[in-house]
């Protein structure tokens, strides 16, 4: 079916001890759309991503990707099917070069691994370079990743995620810790990469300017539940979303 959502979540639940971190979430993400998940700290955004990508097993509920039930798949299996994600905290190999970080990810997506003692240097070179170019890191390929600025490390994370050759990209606070200028640049970059490659993007973000500048759909979480979902205009006008999160009409 052409118009089925790329991702569908139904009745997803996860408790940690007595705390209901994700408490019956339904969500539908349309193919090719940019969809934001917003909500106060602790509202369950990261846990929801962990459940979708197989990093945490749900207590109840289901997740479908392209119409297939992926609820109990491992994170690696989710990745192989075309779901890539970045983490709220940077997740790179700091002592490897920028190029190698992306190379490993491209190789992994092709079911290969890097043999450090073999003719590894040029494997998937073109694919890796194209990705680094798309995120503007092609002049920094030989630097150790740990030497990059925070903003460039975040770009590298995006490149690593793209190395998985995903259909659906999940970015958890892609601009956290960035200056306003880095934030604006990164968001422009993420948007253009997704548009150019026809990727579907699901992201969390605390900066409402960012959310309302690129998202086509917005879902608001509060205490593990969806309290509003719709177009940015609909969510902005929603009294419940205003009360618990947006504070005042924006
Ligand atoms: P958000 O990303 O919206 O800030 P999280 O999903 O990180 O929210 O957290 C939701 C709630 O679940 C928080 O109260 C958090 O403390 C709790 N939580 C998240 N992960 C764990 C865990 N592994 N163990 C215990 N509690 C957790
Ligand atoms: Mg979080």
Image (cartoon, rainbow, N blue to C red):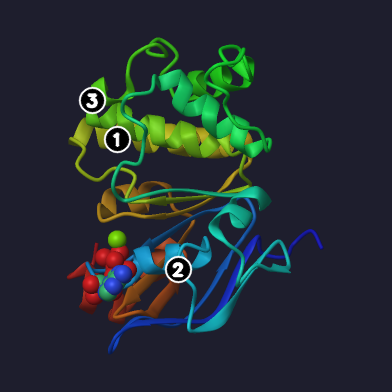
Left or right position of 103 against 144: right
- Tag 3 residue: 149
* Residue 67 visible in the picture: yes
Is 23 situated above or below 195? below
- For the residues labelled 3 and 2, say whether their Cβ atoms are less than 8 Å apart: no
N-terminal of the pair, mark 3 or mark 1, is 3
State the residue in front, 187 or 81.
Answer: 81
- Label 3 secondary element: loop
Left or right position of 34 against 90: right
The answer to whether the residue bearing label 2 lies less than 8 angstroms from the nearest atom of ligand 1 is yes
- Residue 184 — which label? 1
N-terminal of the pair, mark 3 or mark 2, is 2
Is 55 situated above or below 129? below
Quarter of the figure with residue 199 = top right
Specify the quadrant that holds the N terminus. bottom right
- Label 2 secondary element: loop
Residue at (47% x, 64% y) in the render: 231
Q: Nearer the viewer, mark 3 or mark 2?
A: 2
Q: How many other residues sit within 10 Å of disc 1, few (<14), some (14-19) or many (≥20)?
A: some
N-terminal of the pair, mark 1 or mark 2, is 2
Specify the quadrant that holds the C terminus. bottom left
Left or right position of 61 against 228: right
Q: How many other residues sit within 10 Å of disc 2, few (<14), some (14-19) or many (≥20)?
A: some
Specify the quarter for ligand 2: bottom left
State the residue in front, 247 or 220.
Answer: 220
- Tag 2 residue: 56
Where residue 32 appears, x then y in whole percent? 62, 50
Q: How many other residues sit within 10 Å of disc 3, few (<14), some (14-19) or many (≥20)?
A: few
Is 178 situated above or below 209? above
Where residue 139 appears, x then y in whole percent? 40, 10
Where residue 68 appears, x then y in whole percent? 73, 67
């Amino acid at each position: 079916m052409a118009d089925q959502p790329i991702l569908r979540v139904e009745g997803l639940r996860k408790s940690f001890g007595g705390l209901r971190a994700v408490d019956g979430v339904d969500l539908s993400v349309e193919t090719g759309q940019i969809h934001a998940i917003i909500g106060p700290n602790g509202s369950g955004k990261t846990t929801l991503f962990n459940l979708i990508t197989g990093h945490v097993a749900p207590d109840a509920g289901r997740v479908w990707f392209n119409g297939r039930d992926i609820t109990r798949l491992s994170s690696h299996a989710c990745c192989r099917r075309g779901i890539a994600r970045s983490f709220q905290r940077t997740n790179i190999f700091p002592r490897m070069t920028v190029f190698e970080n992306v190379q490993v990810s491209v190789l992994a997506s092709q079911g290969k691994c890097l043999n450090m003692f073999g003719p590894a240097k040029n494997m998937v070179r073109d694919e890796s370079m194209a990705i680094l170019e798309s995120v503007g890191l092609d002049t920094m390929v030989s630097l150790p990743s740990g030497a990059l600025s925070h903003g460039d490390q975040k770009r590298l994370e995006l490149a690593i995620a793209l190395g998985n050759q995903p259909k659906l990209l999940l970015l958890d606070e892609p601009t956290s810790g960035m200056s306003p200028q880095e934030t604006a640049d990164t968001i422009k970059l993420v948007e253009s990469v997704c548009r150019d490659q026809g990727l579907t993007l699901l992201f969390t973000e605390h900066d409402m300017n960012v959310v309302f500048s690129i998202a086509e759909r917005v879902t608001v979480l509060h205490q593990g539940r969806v309290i509003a979902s719709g177009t940015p205009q609909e969510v902005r006008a929603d009294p419940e979303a205003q009360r618990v999160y947006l504070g005042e009409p924006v």
